[in-house]
Image: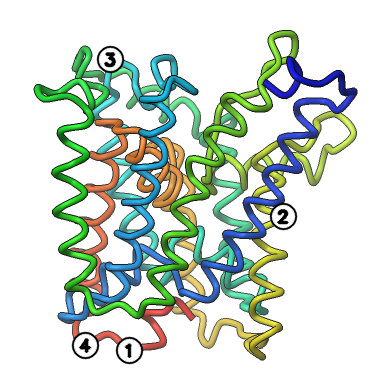
Amino acid sequence: MLYELYDTEINPVFASCLLGVLIGLAFGVAAQLSRFCLRRSVVEFTLGQFPAFGVWLMAFLVAMLGTQALVLDGHMSFAEHRFHVSALPILTVLVGGALFGTGMVLTRGCISRLTVLSATGNLRAAICIVVFAIVAHAALKGVLAPFRLGLGAVTLDVGQFANLGNLPGGAVFWMAIALVVLAVAIYRSGARLVHLLLGAAIGLLVPLGWFGTGAFLQDAFDPIPMASISFTAPWADTLFWSVASTSIAAGFGTGLVGGTLLGSFLAAASRGELALQSFEAPRQTLRYLLGAAMMGLGGVLAGGCTVGAGLAGTASLSLSAVLVLVAMIVSAWLANRLIDGRPARLREMSGQ
């Protein structure tokens, strides 16, 4: 769209990187201020506390409505996107979601939360990100790729129902039901209005990412991948770019990571929340590193993290993403009950 309207020399990949920086900057600020994290939501839910889940559901509701509005208006289509393939890789979806959900309990934060925390001086989060990125890259293109491909060979043909908008009644009908159910759940969650507004802001970033990369910055002669907020492939790409920047350009994902780090740093600095934190014992170190590795592998198998698949993917009405989200939530709930028990400490719930 941009290249049809204007005669510009800006490379689409570079333009997508700038878009990623802007979206990441906004996400970093909003996520730091609201303590946005699916793992925190699950843990608080087990304790009978619902504000964090209310914020997450607000983000999801806005992301879904915004994304589907773009689809219904004809601005974009997910017909060729990997989230909507008819051959559903059922094992990678379920195993990946379970690994990721368990891993985020071990690290006391999903990868998006760890990204935000690392910019505030949390060395545990920073080290976990390095392990996460290495394992994710190994699963995408390295020694773990055969394992991923082996699981991915087991598929289930779901046909047109890979897109839940094709269910009887159509996308508008199911969105209307979701709107009512989620609105009631959000209202009853007891979340603060300011946090709900921050959740809505995060949700708006999802369709902005889809539209920016899938329509606005698309060039027929130099196409770029259609993407939105996610932290699995972007961290793997950022790792690769950081060691080989002369051979690979920074794209949307790398810009998103950089923007998120900057945004969360600025938000934390403005509130006096910058503080160096590290591991307290070898046993804790092992726990966090194992969790980071599980999230790295699980995120690749599942096709995204709690934000990439759980938020942006489900907003596209992808059956695959919905199954991933369910697997993440169930496994996180079970892992929290078995590993951390009850009650969980407030510091652990916030991922700090």
Quick one: SS at disc 4?
loop
Quick one: SS at disc 3?
loop
Q: Is residue 295 left or right of residue 188?
A: right
- Residue 258, which numbered label? 2
Above or below residue 34? Residue 292 is above
In the image, what residue type sits under mark 3?
Answer: Ser
> Which residue is denoted by mark 4 in the rendering?
343
Q: Nearer the viewer, mark 2 or mark 1?
A: 2
Callouts 2 and 3 close, C-beta under 8 Å: no
Distance CA(mark 4)–CA(mark 2): 35 Å
Quick one: SS at disc 1?
loop
**Relative image position of residue 284 (x, y in whole percent):** 46, 78
Dot 4 or dot 2, earlier in sequence:
2
**Relative image position of residue 219 (x, y in whole percent):** 71, 16
Dot 2 or dot 3, earlier in sequence:
3
Please tell me how crowded label 1 is: few (under 14), some (14-19), or many (20+) other residues with Cα within 10 Å. Answer: few
Distance CA(mark 1)–CA(mark 3): 43 Å
In the image, what residue type sits under mark 2?
Answer: Gly
